[in-house]
Amino acid sequence: MISSAYQAPFLAFSAKEKPFPLLKRWVGYADRYNAAAFLYDKAAYENDELNKALNDSLRPPNDMLLTAARASAMNRFAAYATQRVTTEVTRANGLTVRALALLLERYGKNLTAEERIRLSDYAMTNSARASDLKFFDGLVKRSPDTLQRLVNYELMIQRSIRQFDSTAVDYLAAYWLASSLPGLTLNFSRLLYDYARPQVKNPTLAQSLDELYRLEVKDSTRIRAAIQTLRKAGPSANSLELSPGIFITRNDLGNGSSLLDQVINANRGKVIYLLMTSASDEAGRQAALDAQRLRNAYSSRDFALVYLPMPDTDKSLWPEVATRYNLTGDHLLLTNGQLLGAVERLRADDDLSATIINRSGKIVKRNAPLPGAFDDVRKEIDKNL
């Protein structure tokens, strides 16, 4: 019924005209995928499961036409599928012993010969006793961030295998990898790519992933040079220029509120737009990019852009993202403890928020419009110029 509703206008047109066969096929598939996108959005919004009998009509297995509607529908499917596999609770909700043992054997840190033998045995038998959990936990704690991300990725794949066909799982494996890359450091991008890429069997998807990965790491030399500069500075840096126009301020032993004052005082005489954001979140990265348009709209004598990123377990993440995307401006890097002092003054309603500070260093607009609302932000800034 929904598909018919999307197809009705073109069918009415076809009754009066005689469209070319390829155009008819193109529009027909576009209408089908627009209907599919609607259904996936509706199911995701209502947290409902679609009947598997609809799969062939929503995602025709032999469709060779790549349209914008098809790409959009497949991304909506991926969002729907991600919701399904992350919210479903089943008895087989975790990784198998074999999968976890193989991950630990490949990516565990400082493994002894005895530990490798034990992991090999677990992988072979695919079984373990409750008393063996302490052994696994100990190995995971040696590299918790790396292993947890790999476990999460593998867990998503295992759950999707139980719910979707092999073609859909192949797409989801590629989609999750492509979605993760922009929010990862170079080192972890390489690690996840090496792990996940071989799981994608479709040659077209594999080629697209290869191209996306090359785009993400194309500035690796410049990024590694920036990180090396930051490491040489040690735990304290005052307006350290990582890359042209990108200035870092941090002091791991300092007070968060005092460090905020340090950046504000360095920009006295200018209107400051302070953006609190996150490198691990797509909306946060987009807001950071949008803020560059604001910076380009004003003279550097009158306006300053300050980024306050949320702390990450990998301290290299924000500096790498800032360098990769040329996020020119001042960057205040705080620890979790320091951030509390700064947030108390900013009184932000969310992790992604903006604050406007006038020329004399006084906060004049808390929870200001985000950079994406360009005209609204300019109105607030112009009031204080």
Image (spheres, rainbow, N blue to C red):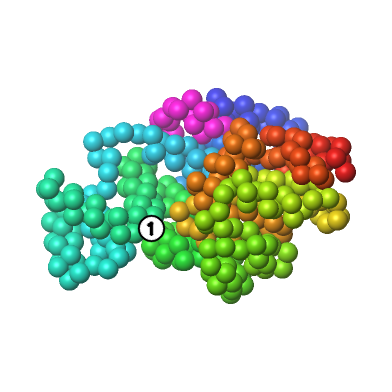
- Residue lying at 63% horizontally and 31% vertically, measured from the top left: 6
- Residue lying at 43% horizontally and 30% vertically, measured from the top left: 50
User: Residue 101's image quarter?
Assistant: bottom left
Left/right placement of residue 233 relative to residue 262 reads left
- Residue lying at 27% horizontally and 68% vertically, measured from the top left: 110
Give x and y (percent) for residue 323. 63, 63
Q: Is residue 17 magenta?
A: no
Left/right placement of residue 162 relative to residue 336 reads left
Give x and y (percent) for residue 312. 49, 52
Left/right placement of residue 85 relative to residue 302 reads left
Q: Is residue 209 above or below residue 38?
A: below
User: Residue 382's image quarter?
Assistant: top right
Front residue of 60 and 201: 201
* Residue 320 in view in this figure: no
Question: Which residue position is annotated with label 1?
Answer: 146
Type of secondary structure dominating the magenta stretch: helix
The amino acid type, in three-letter code, at marker 1 is Thr
Q: Which residues are magenta?
A: 38-55
